[in-house]
Image (tube, helix red, strand yellow):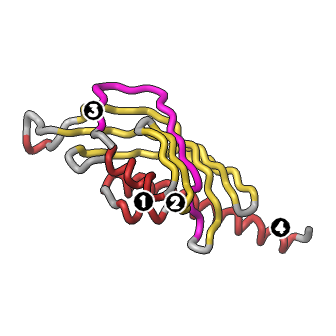
Amino acid sequence: MNTIDTTTRQIQQLADKFEITELVHRLGRALDEGDWDELAALYTADATARTPGGLASGRTALVSQASRNHSPDKRIQHLINGILIDLDGDAATIRANLLVVFAWGLAQDPALGAQPRLTLGEVYRFDAVRTPEGWQFSSVASTPVWSVGTRPTPPAA
């Protein structure tokens, strides 16, 4: 392989990693803001999710599960970092650290807003594929590592 081919391949890998990193951050934003259309667009039609909220297969079930577990009455913030991406052509595996804070109810001081009630440390693992729409997740799994606070009871399916 000549230098131009190597450079072109390296530039493509950097572009792919940037797009995948942005995909991960868009997931956090969609969950935080309850943007279910955006969330759906991040996944392939047959994507799967295995999270503390349950197992979902297919984009519609995945969005339904996320909307049940990220209800508007809770203030939720997903902080995602440590994103590691392994590329294999048009497929990728991703590992990331997740710190998610859930706050609901009124604060003692209304000027402060809702107070954190639950903080979770988790590890995200994703599979992603290049599609005509760009990179999309084909699977996601989150594994809790630790938690502080009280877990809310999720609403019935």
Q: x%, y% of residue 76?
A: 30, 45
The reply to whether the C-beta atoms of the residues labelled 3 and 4 are less than 8 Å apart is no
Q: Name the residue nearer the viewer: 17 or 105.
A: 105
Give the mark nearest the N terminus, 3 or 2.
Answer: 2
Query: Considering the image in quadrants, where does the C terminus appear?
Result: top left
Horizontally, is 65 left or right of 149 in the view? Answer: right
Q: Which amino acid lies under the numbered mark 4 shown in the image of this protein?
A: Thr
Of callouts 4 and 1, which one flags the residue occurring earlier in the amino acid sequence?
Answer: 4
The amino acid type found where label 1 is placed reads: Leu
Q: At 75% from the left edge and 61% from the top edge, which residue is drawn?
A: 89
Amino acid type assigned to the residue bearing label 3 in the image: Pro
Q: Which residues are magenta?
A: 134-154
Residue that carries the numbered disc 3 in the rendered image: 152
Which residue, given by chain and number where applicable, does mark 2 sit on? 43
Residues at marks 3 and 2, CA–CA distance in whole angstroms: 26 Å
Residue plotted at (47% across, 65% down): 41
- The x, y position of residue 72, in whole percent, is 23, 50
> What's the mark number on residue 39?
1
Q: Are marks 2 and 1 in contact (CB under 8 Å)?
A: yes
Kindly indicate the quadrant of the structure image that contains residue 116.
top left
Q: Is residue 144 left or right of residue 109?
A: right
For label 4, the residue is 6
> Could you tell me which secondary element the residue under label 3 belongs to?
loop
